[in-house]
Amino acid sequence: MSNLVPLNSPVLHRPASPIAEDEFGTKPLAAAIDQLGESFDVFFKAYKGVGLAAPQIGIPWRLAVAEDYGLRPTSPRWQHDLVRRPFARIIMCNPTIAWASDEQIFAWETCLSEADVVGLVERPREMQIEYRSSRGAAQSLVAQDWAARILSHEVDHLFGCLCSQRYLPGSSMATDQYTREWKDRPLSDALRAFRAG
Ligand SMILES: [Zn+2]
């Protein structure tokens, strides 16, 4: 497994390199995917992470993994206000957002790369993602609500954008404050407080 790179690493802040046609199915790409998967296993268990982009562990490729275990009794109260359907692990090479709904929703968001801060981020309720499999096969999926948010967050990483850049002004705070004040409240309370409703 690989460690997360520090927040000031350039690889987190610039667009990742697209995987070239002749790199699909090769050993270097398979090795990068294994490394990403192993790291994700660790973060997935330790921090309940739901996605990891290759640049977060220092791999400058347009490559990301996502998986959602769905709501649990320990999930924050506000997550019950969103549709959250579990989905199995997806490895995405060169993902792009092909279509996004006009309807957007706000939700609290943080990132493994800056886990000490949380804020409200607005994202499309529904989107279509196109990507390639590790062997280069063209794939497409439509995701809603929580799944759309996860995939959109990962695609952002591959273009050098961290969710903190999308925080609704005034809504970002230290994680311990969020845990104390907002984690167990409905999303509508947060939207009212930060005038995002
Ligand atoms: Zn992230």
Image (tube, rainbow, N blue to C red):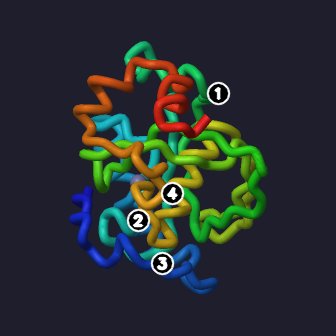
> Which circle marks residue 151 in the picture?
none
Quadrant in the picture for the C terminus = top right
Check disc 2 and give the amino acid type: Ala
Residue 116 visible to an observer of this rendering: yes
Secondary structure of the residue carrying numbered label 4: helix
Check disc 3 and give the amino acid type: Pro
How crowded pointer 1 is (Cα within 10 Å; few <14, some 14-19, many 20+) is rated as some
How crowded pointer 4 is (Cα within 10 Å; few <14, some 14-19, many 20+) is rated as many
Secondary structure of the residue carrying numbered label 3: loop
Distance, label 3 to label 2, CA atoms, is 11 Å
Q: Are marks 1 and 4 in contact (CB under 8 Å)?
A: no
The mark nearer the N terminus, 2 or 1, is 2
The residue indicated by pointer 4 is 154
Distance, label 2 to label 4, CA atoms, is 9 Å
The residue indicated by pointer 1 is 83
Quick one: 63 or 159, which is closer to the camera? 159
Respond yes or no on whether mark 4 lies under 8 Å from ligand 1. yes
> Which circle marks residue 15 in the picture?
3
Check disc 4 and give the amino acid type: Glu
